[in-house]
Image: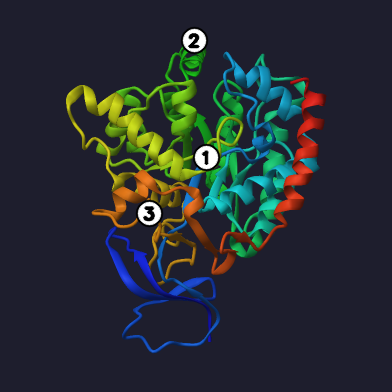
Amino acid sequence: MFDLLIQNVSVLMPDFSVKEGQNIYVKDSRIVKIADAAADDAKEAKEVISGRGKLVMPGLIDGHTHTCQQLLRGRTANEYPMVWTRILVPFESNLTPEDCYYSAKLACLEMIKSGTTAFAESGSTHMGDVAEAVKESGMRAAIARSTMDIGGAIPDSMKISAEKNMQLTQDLYEKYQGAGEGRLDIWFAIRQVMTCSPELIREIGTEARRLKTGIHAHLCEHKDEVSFCLQHYGKRPAEFLEDMGVLGPNLLTAHNVVLSERDIDRLGEHQVKLIHCPRANYANHGFPKTPRILQNKISLGLGCDGAARSNLSLFAEMKILLYGTMAYWGLPIFDPDVLCAKDLLTMATMGGAQALQHEDILGTVEEGKKADFITIDIMQPHLTPTHNLLNTLVDCASKHDVVDSVIDGKLVMKDRKVLTMDEEEVIRECEKRMKEIAGRAGI
């Protein structure tokens, strides 16, 4: 008896070929069999989903988000710099544990309906409440607690000693590492080099190695960060972090916009996992050197950077990165192939899996891996017929085309109805809290 059977479905294979008419069997959270439906003797399963007219593909993985900023939606657009100090810091410093819980539930709800099955949370306050919300949602996540101990723009209430920062993350790790039947990982966070002292950064590197867990950092997001590092340490951020002992395969860096050529080489040498946030980057910071990063064969994923300005759709991020990269890097040198559909789909799936340090179990649909996948309704006039389904997925598919979502072998969305949360109740509660937080924060 299998737990789940997706019957007679097209499957996006690890080599990006598409196999039609397949049965996918799930048991004990794993994909145990993928077989030709025509030749397969149908086995019994506790739940059977028709795959007719659908494509199964790996669940998308958001490599950088802020679940606690969900209730900032629509507030940071058309604002002059520095948005972070004028809006985000007052907002974040006024969040209650219950605010973070419901904000995270709303973020998980949106991600599930957008085809995202796993994410890396870069950290805020009250992360235990975020962990509880994620655990209940059925999603998979690497959750970090924001750590800051310096910075003139940061209120004292958000700055605590390096020792206390370390203790709080260690406590979070002890309570939630491996929670949700193994779906939750607890990481350390370097909010950014402008708000973390060298002492704190060194301690994070040491402790993350001891616990064999990850580190989530904003890196080279904007020129002010590079200027700060050069003025205070005489080094660019990547070199500074190298000296602090944190560059390594367990480091995930978000944004990566203002990287020098040597920065890219250095990050590649240390096997750091990079994440681009196209809409956030283009709106605030500029065009990252995506072709150069891919040329160096550095692991690269995608992130939505939270919902303060946009939504949590990685389908949208793929499109924006494709056309922004073509316009900025491709057209000036007449290179239409500077970025292709396979690159983008790899970023949104395997790139995210590598960033979460779970490429052995996530990122592709194949036997033996975790059953973290989604179905796309491809029998729609904007998707079918097509000469090239990969190109059409990237160019034309959207979050609204996601029909079903399976995470860790469990069906969390069926026919676009999320099964793990009450959608109306979550939205209603968040509407009330958004107004209350805005009033307390004065934004």
Q: How crowded is mark 2: few (under 14 residues within 10 Å), some or many (20 or more)?
A: few
Asked if 57 appears above or below 336 in the picture, the reply is: below
Kindly report which numbered mark, 1 or 2, lies closer to the viewer in this rendering.
Answer: 1
Amino acid type indicated by mark 1: His
- Tell whether label 3 touches label 1 (CB within 8 Å): no
Please give left or right for residue 388 compared with residue 32 in the image: left
Which callout, 1 or 3, points to the residue nearer the camera? 3
Q: Position of residue 97 (x, y in %)?
A: 79, 41
Residue at 41 percent across and 49 percent down: it is: 397
SS category of the residue bearing label 1: strand
Query: What amino acid is at disc 3?
Result: Pro
| Res 280 seen here | yes
Q: Going by the image, does 9 lie left or right of 164?
A: left
In percent of width and height, residue 89 lies at 69, 24
Residue 196 x/y as whole percent: 60, 25
Among numbered discs 1 and 3, the one appearing first in the sequence: 1
Q: Mark 1 points at which residue?
A: 64
Say which element carries label 2. helix
Assess disc 3: are there few (<14), some (14-19) or many (≥20) residues with their C-alpha within 10 Å of its C-alpha: few
Above or below, 367 against 72 in this view is below
Residue toward you, 148 or 212: 148
Q: Name the residue under label 3.
A: 381
Label disc, if present, on residue 231 of the rendered structure: 2
